[in-house]
Amino acid sequence: MEDIKIDKKLDIRGQVCPYTLVRSKLGVESIEVGQVIEILLDYPEAADSIPKAMLNYGHSVLKVEKINPGEWIVQVRKEVED
């Protein structure tokens, strides 16, 4: 399994929708096409809605992983310029 190079990390623990999505979208906008952002979150609905939204925006979702009972990481590769 190849190691994914993380270009930016975004910690949005403590945030709830719609702020989780807004912060994630801004995070992706701040990186270059081809780069990867890792988003750390603790809002269960966001673990579902953020990957769906990123796919809708045309980006690749590389990983959605529950890292402990209340936290997830979502890795997104920027595929298109926003």
Image (tube, grey):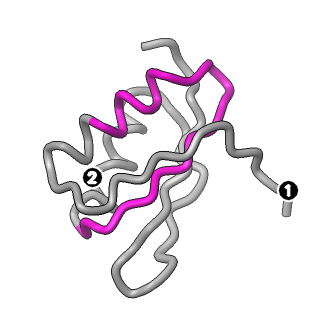
Q: What residue is shown at x 55% (from left), y 49% (from top)?
A: 38
Q: Give the alpha-carbon distance from disc 2 to disc 1, as whole Å.
A: 26 Å
| Residue labelled with disc 2 | 49
Q: Amino acid at mark 1?
A: Glu
Q: State the count of labels.
A: 2
Q: Label 2: how many residues lie within 10 Å, few (<14), some (14-19) or many (20+)?
A: some
Front position in the image: 34 or 55 = 34
Q: 68 above or below 25? A: below
Residue 41 in magenta stretch:
yes
Point out residue 45 in the picture as x, y percentages from the top left corner: 22, 63
Instruction: Using the rendered view, name the quadrant where residue 22 is placed.
Output: top left
Q: What residue is shown at x 50% (from left), y 32% (from top)?
A: 59
Q: Residue furthest bottom?
A: 69
Front position in the image: 41 or 81 = 41
Q: 12 above or below 42? A: above
Q: Residue furthest top?
A: 81
Q: 80 above or below 8? A: above
| Residue labelled with disc 1 | 2
Q: Label 1: how many residues lie within 10 Å, few (<14), some (14-19) or many (20+)?
A: few
Quarter of the figure that contains the N terminus: bottom right
Q: Which mark is residue 64?
A: none
Point out residue 68 in the picture as x, y percentages from the top left corner: 46, 84
**What segment is highlighted magenta in the picture?**
23-44
Q: Amino acid at mark 2?
A: Ser
Q: SS class of the residue under badge 2? A: helix
Quarter of the figure that contains the C terminus: top left
Q: SS class of the residue under badge 1? A: loop
